[in-house]
Image (tube, helix red, strand yellow):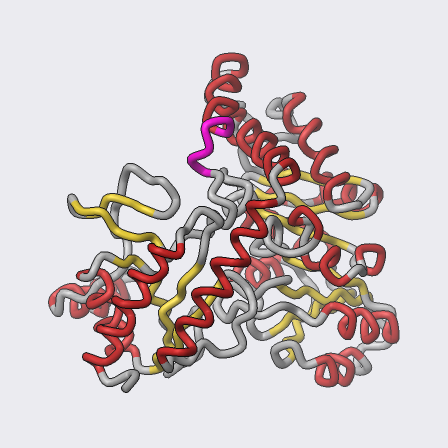
Amino acid sequence: MDIFEKCYNYHDPDEVKAAGLYPYFRPHHAKTDTIVIMEGKEVIMLGSNSYLGLTSHPEVKEAAKKAIDIHGTGCAGSRFLNGTLDLHEELEKKLAKFVDKEDAIIFSTGFFANQGAISALVSRHDAVFIDRLDHASIVDGTRLGFGEVVRFRHSDCNNLDMLLSRYPDKGKIVVVDGIYSMDGDIAPLPDLIKVCKKHGARLFVDDAHSLGVLGKNGKGTANHFGVVNDVDIIMGTFSKSLAAQGGFVAGEHKVIDYIRHHSRPFIFSASLAPALLAAVDKALEIMQREPERIANLWEITRYAAKGYRQLGFDIGKAETPIIPIIIGDMEMTFKFWKLLYDNGIFVNCVIPPAVPENKCIIRTSYVATHTKDQIDKALSAFEKAGKQLGIIK
């Protein structure tokens, strides 16, 4: 049997493309966070995770340019061997301090941060408990490790309690998203902490979508709930609020040092480029210096959510700048996406396996630099498309 046979028989994208409804890999340029140029026309971007609108900030761009002048474009090696710069260590100290932990370690992607930390910590004598809606990087981290993987119902602390009780003699760690990337809801950390303490389990929180969004100055979910000392590990990414690429994990020094010496995705991947480190450093500074950005983000979020609800759209339990429009049927979701795109609105079309079967969504996300005028134009396009397809009356 030819291993490529499955590739030759894979026609799903071709069928969607033939129908003119394919929403993925759409190139754009001249990015300004809220407006992009796609196929020669301006489009309002409602699919970006640049929550604070810092990817185009002049200070962030200048910092990246200066880092290239000093350090070049890359490190040409792994952190473990020859690829550690003073920029890496300085930023790790700042990140640890920012999230109120002893130490931090930087990975070359946010995906690697989850994958690398979880796989390093979970051995064959341990069990890792993950929420059914956890990000793919968390799931893949459990696959790379050797421990038993147990899934619990989304944000269901009673279900987690019952499952943890079955593993009294194993090392246990619970891994959750702070903000869930598709549903836009927040993990119930206080309740999760009670259950973890009851069973002697550690708690790992993925704050990829929470940094810059929740907590004082955007410090994340644990800070938002006032439970920083009860969360053992905080993970964050640089590709959302921090305007670049990469990720980090923060916690006790001994735990982070163990990850530093045991994480395969960390040891065997090239270190983060100087320009990206400098961009993150500057974005972190601006995020703390300009708290009004977070205030603007939440004002726009509330405005948009209210607008969708008033139009009759189902946005589920969304309570953050991630607002899903729940459609359900896959073909209908593709058609809705196309109508929005044709009316100058870019959103993310999300289908299985990113969401359950028959629960396809149009994922929208908001940026501090969005204007109410832009949101009004988007709501108008949503209303027009929704009525045309019979999604709303």
The relative height of residue 192 versus residue 296 in the rendered view (above or below) is: below
- Residue positioned 31% across, 82% down in the render: 329
Quadrant location, the N terminus:
bottom left
| Residue at image coords 23%, 73% | 385
**In percent of the image, x 59 and y 63: which residue is there?**
179
Q: Position of residue 328 (x, y in %)?
A: 35, 82
When the figure is inspected, residue 330 is found, relative to residue 91, above or below; the finding is below
Q: Residue at x 75, y 63 (%)?
A: 225
**Which residue is more in the foreground, 31 or 122?**
31
Residue 264, given in percent of the width and then of the height, sits at: 62, 44
Quarter location, residue 386? bottom left
Indicate the quadrant where residue 203 lies. Answer: bottom right
Q: Note whether 112 is above or below 328 in the view shown.
A: above
Q: From this view, report whether residue 392 is shown above or below residue 248.
A: below
Q: Which residues are magenta?
A: 55-60
Residue lying furthest front: 373
Quarter of the picture holding the C terminus: bottom left
On screen, residue 249 versus residue 355, left or right, reads right
Is residue 9 visible in the rendered structure shown here?
no
Q: Is residue 386 magenta?
A: no
* 93 with respect to 253 (left or right): left
Report which quarter residue 5 is drawn in.
bottom left
